């Protein structure tokens, strides 16, 4: 499932974030790449432990925790602390698949990468190129979203970032370990949950809503790992 989540960050949060990002230290993005990805990766990143990354990471995690659409779609168990990258002057990231397991820096914990996420900080008109291209069952999907919007897609997907030929593409990227690791099962639960919400809105107190809610929770009980 590939899902766009609009307006994760408010205009005020976006303004603050861009002020911080413009003043941050940027280093070669290969520092967080695996062996295969490092051969395809050409961008800049903010070091993981940099105060700017930590401050903005807290902002993003707070916004995610307060976003019902994200919670419904991702069913998050753990979230890797957000990282930040910038593409300029023809930089790109060739076709790759994300590492299946990520080590949390400075901690003994690891997370399984079920869902990949990209949060856009630069508006589409600020740069040319830079589309995130994700290969899924139905072909290649190109993603270039407004600032403050985030896209979720399965971490099993092959994907790449096209060269940025003008301006700067500035994003955050991170991974989610879901309570439900299978993307197909998450999609079923997402559709069912959204259907229940629409039914409750259109026909309040309809008795079938209780039955469907029971189906949702019984499926979640069967599929979830907590």
Image (spheres, grey):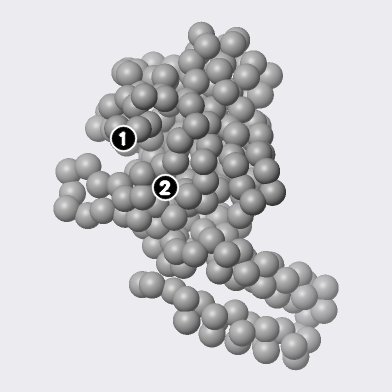
Q: Quadrant of the N terminus?
A: bottom right
Image vertical order of residue 101 relative to residue 150, above or below: below
* Residue on which the image places disc 1: 34
Characterize the local packing of mark 1: few (<14), some (14-19) or many (20 or more) Cα atoms within 10 angstroms: few
Residue 179 occupies which quadrant of the picture?
Answer: bottom left
In the image, 108: left or right of 29? left
Residue 86, position in %: x, y?
46, 21
Residue at image coords 17%, 53%? 108
Q: Secondary structure at mark 1?
A: loop
Side of 215 where 77 appears, left or right: left
The tag earlier along the polypeptide, 1 or 2, is 1
* Front-lying residue, 204 or 126: 126
Image point (57%, 60%), residue name: 73
- Residue 21: x, y in percent? 43, 22
Question: Which of the 4 quarters of the picture holds residue 140?
Answer: top right
Residue drawn at point x = 42 percent, y = 47 percent: 175
Q: Are marks 1 and 2 in contact (CB under 8 Å)?
A: no
- Check residue 175 in the rendering and tell me which mark sits there, or answer none: 2
**Residue 190 at x, y = what percent?**
62, 66
- The quadrant the C terminus occupies is bottom left
Label 2 residue SS: strand
Distance from Cα at disc 1 to Cα at disc 2: 15 Å
Q: What residue is drawn where x is 56% and y is 16%?
A: 164
């Amino acid at each position: 499932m590939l899902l766009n989540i609009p307006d994760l960050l408010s205009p005020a949060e976006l303004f603050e974030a861009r002020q911080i990002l413009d003043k941050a230290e940027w280093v070669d993005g290969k520092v967080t790449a695996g062996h295969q990805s490092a051969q395809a990766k050409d961008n800049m990143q903010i070091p993981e432990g940099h105060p700017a990354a930590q401050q903005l990471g807290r902002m993003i995690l707070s916004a995610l925790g307060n976003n019902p659409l994200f919670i419904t779609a991702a069913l998050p168990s753990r979230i890797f602390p957000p990282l930040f990258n910038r593409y300029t002057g023809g930089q790109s990231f060739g076709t790759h698949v994300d590492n299946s397991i990520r080590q949390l820096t400075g901690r003994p914990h690891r997370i399984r990468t079920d869902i990949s996420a990209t949060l856009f900080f630069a508006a589409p008109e600020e740069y040319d190129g830079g589309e995130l291209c994700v290969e899924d069952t139905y072909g290649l999907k190109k993603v270039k979203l407004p600032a403050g919007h985030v896209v979720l897609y399965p971490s099993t997907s092959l994907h790449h970032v096209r060269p940025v030929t003008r301006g700067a593409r500035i994003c955050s990227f991170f991974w989610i370990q879901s309570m439900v690791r299978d993307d197909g099962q998450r999609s079923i639960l997402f559709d069912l949950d959204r259907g229940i919400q629409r039914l409750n809105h259109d026909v309040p107190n309809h008795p079938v809503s209780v039955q469907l809610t029971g189906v949702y929770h019984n499926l979640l009980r069967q599929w979830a790992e907590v």
